[in-house]
Image (cartoon, rainbow, N blue to C red):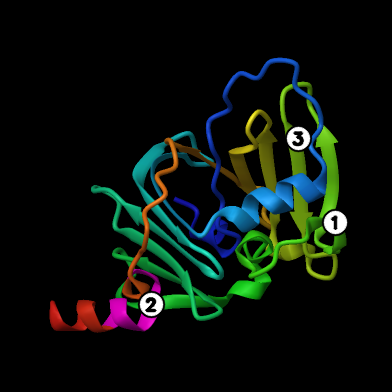
Amino acid sequence: MHRRTFIALASACAAAPATAASKLSLNDISGYLNAITTAKTGFTQVNDDGTLSTGTLFIRRPGRIRFEYNPPEELLVIAGGGQVGIFDGKSNLQNAERYPLRRTPLSLILEKNVDLARRNMVVGHDFDGTATVVTAQDPEHPEYGRLQLKFTEGPVELRQWIVTDGQGSKTTVVLGELDRPGALSSALFSIENEERLRGRNK
C-alpha cells in the first residue's frame, strides 16, 4: 500500500445512480459538509495497485477523522489536533508518522466553516453528467497531492473521494451508508492517546 497516499488521505464513495441530475453549487456542497458533525461508516478501499482494503471510517468535524483498517492490514490513520498521524504496523507500530493537516486537501472539508466558493484550494468545479466534481489542490504546493470529491443531488451526498499523490498514485475508497451517531469520543481522534495505548500493550 502506498503510504504517501495518506499524506493527502484519499477516500472515495461509491457512485449511486441519479435521475435528472444537475450541477450543484459550491454553496450547496459547503452547506452539506457543514451539516455533518459526526459520521461513521464502513469502507472498501481500492489501492493504486488494484488490491483491496476494508475498514471503518469515523468523522467528527471540525478537524477530526479516523480510518481503522481491518486485518490483514496493519494501518491506522488519524487526523486530530491539526495533525495527521499514520500508524503502520510494518514500520511504526507504536509511534505515528505525522504530517500537518493543513498540508493535506482533507483540511478543506474538515475545517470549522467550509466555504468552497472562497477557498483558493478549489481548482476545479465540474459536472460529469451524473455528479458534481470538486477538485482541490494547494496551489502553492501541488506536490502535496490532489483531492477529487464527487457529489450527487436529491439529497446532496458525497459519493466519491479520490486522491492523487505527488507521484501520480491514486487511491479510491467506497463508503457505505453514513451513520450519524450522536457523539464520538475525542479519544478516537487523539494521536497521543493512540500512542499511549500502544505503548502499554508492547
Q: Amino acid at mark 1?
A: Ala
> Measured from the top left, where is residue 79 in percent x and y?
48, 69
Check if mark 2's residue and mark 1's residue have beta carbons within 8 Å.
no
Residue range highlighted in magenta: 188-195
Tell which circle, 2 or 1, labels the residue nearer the N-terminal end: 1
Residue 132 numbered mark, or none: 3
Q: CA distance from mark 3 to mark 1?
A: 14 Å
Task: Residue at 55%, 54% (x, y): give it.
Answer: 36
> Measured from the top left, where is residue 66 in percent x and y?
41, 61
Q: Amino acid at mark 3?
A: Thr
Q: Which residue is mark 2?
A: 190
Q: CA distance from mark 2 to mark 1?
A: 30 Å
Q: Amino acid at mark 2?
A: Ser
Determine the image quadrant of residue 154: top right
Task: Residue at 70%, 52% (x, y): give it.
Answer: 31
Tell which circle, 3 or 1, labels the residue nearer the N-terminal end: 1
Q: Which residue is mark 1?
A: 117
Q: CA distance from mark 2 to mark 3?
A: 33 Å
